[in-house]
Amino acid sequence: MKKLSIVFVLLLTLSLFTNAQSDSALSSEDIKYINFFKSHGLLPENIDKGNIPTDKLKELIEYFKKEYGIDDIDSIEKPDDRFSSPEKVWELFRSSFLNGDIEIANKCLMPKYREKHDAIRKAIGDDKMKRKIEEMRPIEKVIEEDGRAKYRIKRRIGDQDITFYIYFVQAFGKWKILRY
C-alpha cells in the first residue's frame, strides 16, 4: 500500500501544474476516484481536482485498476461477505473453478497472479487443473497480520503428503489470493 501511495504522489507531483483543467473536464467517475484516492491517503487532501492533469489521472486510475483488479469504483467499499476472510475467498475460488465459473474464480485472485494462473491453466488444461484443486484438502492458517495471511494446504502426491502455501492479501476490506 505504501508503494502505491508513493507512486501516486510522485506521478502527481511531477506533473501537477503542467496541464491544469477545470472540474467540468472530469467525468463523474474521475471525481469518484479522486475522492476515493484522497480518503485513503493515496492523494494529498489539499490537491484541487482542477489541478490534476486528465492524462495523469487516467494513468493513475489504470494503474490502480491493474494493481488491484478493481473495475468498478462503486463496488470498492461495498461489503461482500464472500471476500471477508481468506477461508471464504479460498472456498469461493475452489467452488467457482470446479463449477466452471472462471470469471468468479479470477475475482478471487490479485491481478498479477491471475495472469500467471491463467497461463498455467491454459498450459495444463481445465480438467487437470480441476483434478489438482479437487485433491486439495482444507486450508490451515499459518499466520495472519496487517492485512496479509499465509495458509498451508496438503495434497497427496504419490504416497506422500506435500505441503503447499497460499498467500492472501487484504485490499480495501476484501481478501484476495496473492499466490499459491
Image: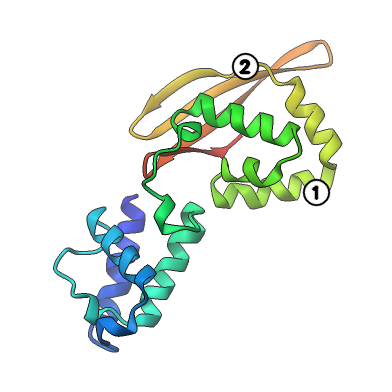
At 42% from the left and 74% from the top, the residue drawn is: 58
Q: Which residue is mark 1?
A: 122
SS at mark 1 in the image: helix
At 39% from the left and 44% from the top, the residue drawn is: 78
Hey, what amino acid is under mark 1? Lys
- Residue 174 at x, y = what percent? 43, 39
Q: Is residue 120 above or below residue 5?
A: above
Hey, what amino acid is under mark 2? Pro
Q: Which residue is mark 2?
A: 138
Closer to the camera in the image, 155 or 40: 40
Please state if 166 lies on the left or on the right of 26 as rendered.
right
SS at mark 2 in the image: loop
- Residue 67 at x, y = what percent? 48, 56
Closer to the camera in the image, 155 or 99: 99
- Residue 114 at x, y = what percent? 62, 48
Answer with mark 1 or mark 2, whichever residue precedes in sequence: 1
Crowding near pointer 1: few (<14 within 10 Å), some, many (20+)?
few
Quadrant in the picture for residue 24: bottom left
At 14% from the left and 68% from the top, the residue drawn is: 46
Quadrant where the image shows the C terminus: top right
Crowding near pointer 2: few (<14 within 10 Å), some, many (20+)?
few
Q: Label for residue 5?
A: none
